[in-house]
Amino acid sequence: DNPAIEAEVIDMLSRLLKQLGLEDFNLLINSVGCSVCRPAYVNKLREELRAHADELCEECRRRTETNPLRVLDCKVPSCQPVIERLPAIADWLCEECREHFALFRKYLDIHGITAQLAPRLVRGLDYYVRTTFEIVSNRLGPTQNAVVGGGRYDGLSELIGGPPTKGFGFALGMERLVLLVSGRSELGAPYQAPAPEIFLVHLDTPAFEHNLKLAAELREDGIFAYIDFEGKSIKSQMRQANRVSAKFTCVVGESELQTGRFMLKRMTDGAQVTLGRNEVSEYLRKEE
């Protein structure tokens, strides 16, 4: 329960981001109280929101009844004037929660970590208590800019049938982190998805089902096989094979299923080879 643990976790995250070459991020913090003080705040919040329901978007009106704290997360511009006038949860914290949050901020200072108090920063899930935080980067835009978010979730273990257990953790947005570090010379070239060794084109449902099994067998042999799942035409599937830079294509229809012979076409030069099904994997491995 010691808030020093929370500061330690955030210090670890800060060091990680800096080691990845990120310096321009901000730490936002708040406290969402506990089961003692939060219910009164939620009731007050719901009361205020109901009084201004006609100024809120449809989603916020729904959340007013189901989970008022989630209204504070709303990014709809027309809702912001109402949200800005709502009471802050910091004014409703019990003495223990106030002391916990004050110690947390003290320990951040000891670590030399600058934090910005964000009164509207909440977690809409009931098992979150006390400390919440986000690490944001303006390079991701003004709204969906959180790289890391988390907090204390002492109630989670009990919620899923476990014993009372203290907890503090976070979720890290890998896609957003990749966007921020991509292209940095010291980290190597930006990530590029590998090209499929083969794109299996199907003409009908039996061919599609055959290709599912063939793709699984090829993947078992370490070969990247690609299949269309959207029911596209042959022409569209071939265009997709070009878009994903597949090395080979193989069109499967009734004839291929009957004969057990499959024609592979190399996309770079159009060269073709006809193989038995059990020869496809070995041929592709040699062509890698």
Image: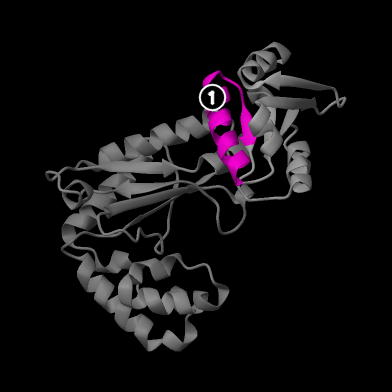
Residue 34 versus residue 13 in the image, above or below: below
Q: Main secondary structure of the magenta part?
A: helix
User: Amino acid type of disc 1?
Assistant: Glu
Quarter in which the C terminus is drawn? top right
Rendered image quadrant of residue 189: top right
Residue 5 versus residue 91 in the image, above or below: above
Q: Is residue 68 left or right of residue 22?
A: left
Q: Where residue 227 sits: x, y (%)?
A: 63, 38
Q: Is residue 32 visible?
A: yes
Q: Residue at x 23, y 63 (%)?
A: 93
Name the residue carrying label 1.
Answer: 217
Q: Is residue 196 visible?
A: no
Q: Is residue 188 left or right of residue 245?
A: left
The colour scheme used here is one colour
Q: Where residue 237 sits: x, y (%)?
A: 73, 43
Q: Which residues are magenta?
A: 205-226
Q: Secondary structure at mark 1?
A: helix
